[in-house]
Amino acid sequence: MITGIAHIGIRVHDLDRSAAFYALLGFVKTAGPIGHEPVAILEHPAGVEINLILNAPIASEPNILMDVPDKHAGITHIALLVPNLDAAIATLAAAGIALSGGPIQFLPTARGAFIRDPDRNVIELHERTAQR
């Protein structure tokens, strides 16, 4: 029935700021903003599509799913596969993007590190490797 993920919707405050951030991860804006609640479409050569939903009214609000003591139901992060986690971390560090968590060894064959976009949405960079 399901054959894949069509896109990931991420609520943001400022299109230019968010598009610049996601461009560092290799995403390119291909459409938008379009629609009643404006959406900009970003695509990645790996086949991942992100829809930036441009309706976060206040840039300085906390991420309700991650940054408040009371936990709310919802998706806490997306995990993007990277072939080499150390190289991805170094590339981000060179661009001034600090880790918000990790690196963490999840399984002998999986590890990840976490960053935040400008609106504090959490992104995991996830590497699957041979046995370490």
Image (cartoon, helix red, strand yellow):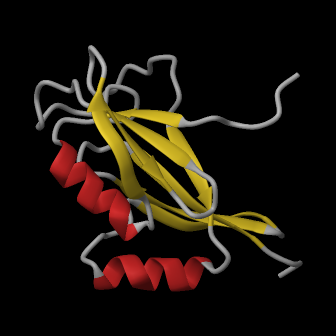
Give the residue at x 26% y 36%. 12
The mark total stands at 0
Q: Position of residue 112 (x, y in %)?
A: 61, 64
- Left or right: residue 75 versus residue 14 is right
Residue shown at 37% from the left, 76% from the top: 92
Looking at the picture, does residue 81 appear above or below residue 53? Answer: below
Quadrant where the image shows the C terminus: bottom right
In front: 125, or 69? Answer: 125
Q: Quick check: 31 above or below 84?
A: above
Quadrant position of the N terminus in the picture? top right
| Location of residue 63 by image quarter | top left
Tell me where residue 47 appears, x and y as whole percent.
63, 54
Residue 68: x, y in percent?
30, 28
In the rendered view, tell whether residue 74 sits above or below residue 24.
Answer: above
What residue appears at the point 45 percent right and 17 percent down from the top-left corner? 72
Vertical side of 1 occupied by 13: above or below = below
| Residue 16 or residue 30, whichever sits in front | 30
